[in-house]
Amino acid sequence: MPREPRARESRNGTPQLDAVSLAIIEQLQEDGRRPYAAIGKAVGLSEAAVRQRVQKLLDQGVMQIVAVTDPLTVGFRRQAMVGVNVDGDLDPVADALSAMPEVEYVVMTAGSFDILAEIVCEDDDHLLDVINKRIRALPGVRSTESFVYLKLKKQTYMWGTR
Amino acid sequence: MPREPRARESRNGTPQLDAVSLAIIEQLQEDGRRPYAAIGKAVGLSEAAVRQRVQKLLDQGVMQIVAVTDPLTVGFRRQAMVGVNVDGDLDPVADALSAMPEVEYVVMTAGSFDILAEIVCEDDDHLLDVINKRIRALPGVRSTESFVYLKLKKQTYMWGTR
DNA sequence: CTTCAAGCTGCGAAATCCGCAAGACAAGCA
DNA sequence: TGCTTGTCTTGCGGATTTCGCAGCTTGAAG
């Protein structure tokens, strides 16, 4: 009888995570450089097992271990969220936005915008260029609305750690 | 009388970063677990110097090294961006939003919303509860507009790496 | 000129990472 | 049942990395 088919993949292709992998991710969300042995002690696994699971999570793209900063402290003085409305298929526009290096974040949404995109720029001229010349010029873009960031109040990466 | 200690901090309290620290951050944005020695070779510093600088950047809160994931793969099925309009001072509302564990991201903006907040929830009920019962009940909140996420297309943490 | 603090370097000891071989276990099949 | 297969796990050395410390250099302040 198929008790538990080993929990391989869900139908959309995203790997299924068991409780142990979740716990490993939580450990690394607290400190991305925590040693494997310490993680193993916390989640009840050997050091080598943790290492292999972490490697797999990275390979699968489920998780990435990176340094994150407040863009303001690294010299990017202007940021904005841009709401975009599109005629026709969203995918080409979303892909074009994703291809721009200044665009950090692209998400398709339900509501009065079709797409939200976060822009990180060095100054006002740069921001204006991206929004006015590049995004609004994309085929299929009907209209855009910009929200220039004034102050970042919170930025966390602690999903699952609550 | 302390004139200027050592060009340590700019007037808003954010530490000033030189080119070497920037380069270190870029290395760690590519791989948060890269060894100090390898980073040192890349930026022209000794292993110990890199280690000291990284520790300082972490202590100062300029940078954090963490695992990041797509929330969908860790069991959070509903996300939304919420635009908030406020009567009076923004700060109390922004602080209240920041205090909610479901709120990942809070930013004050110029434009037709005063505040943008990103919500990460487990399901529709949870999302509805947060938006309708908790956010709209905050004193000072005049109105909200929600954008439920349909698909995340891009998510990067590569500021400075371009 | 002297003092002082901050930052960098080099080095040895301790801890960690990494690859590999072997064991355990469930699922599939004849 | 017995066999095979694939995945996960464990245990171990050797190579690598991290860590703490002492000494050196530099620049600012007294």
Image (cartoon, coloured by chain):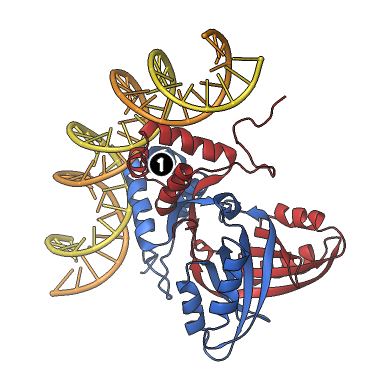
Chain colours: A blue, B red, C orange, D yellow
Residue C19: give x, y in percent of width and height.
Answer: 20, 46
Q: Is residue A76 above or below residue A39?
A: below
Q: Nearer the viewer, residue B113 or A123?
A: A123
Residue visible at 68% across and 69% down? Answer: A147
Name the quadrant containing residue A109.
bottom right
Residue A53 visible in the current orientation: yes
Q: Chain of mark 1?
A: A
Residue visible at 37% across and 47% down? Answer: A50
Q: Is residue A130 above or below residue B26?
A: below
Residue A116 visible in the current orientation: no
Name the quadrant containing residue B133.
bottom right
Q: Dot 1: within a 10 Å radius of its alpha carbon, few (fewer than 14), some, or many (20 or more) residues?
A: many
Q: Nearer the viewer, residue C15 or B94?
A: B94
Left or right placement of residue C6 versus residue A9 in this view: right
Per the image, label 1 sits on a secondary structure element best described as helix
Residue B78: give x, y in percent of width and height.
Answer: 60, 69
Residue A80: give x, y in percent of width and height.
Answer: 63, 66
Left or right placement of residue B58 versus residue B43 in this view: right
- Amino acid type, residue under disc 1 in the picture: Gly
Question: Which image quarter holds the C terminus of chain B?
Answer: bottom left
Question: Which image quarter holds the N terminus of chain B?
Answer: top right
Residue visible at 53% across and 40% down? Answer: B58
Q: Is residue B60 above or below residue B79?
A: above
Q: Is residue A34 above or below residue B111?
A: above
Left or right placement of residue B150 versus residue D9 in this view: right
Q: Nearer the viewer, residue B27 or B8?
A: B8
Q: Which residue is mark 1?
A: A40
Left or right placement of residue A76 versus residue B85 in this view: left
Residue A155: give x, y in percent of width and height.
Answer: 62, 54
Residue visible at 53% across and 46% down? Answer: B64
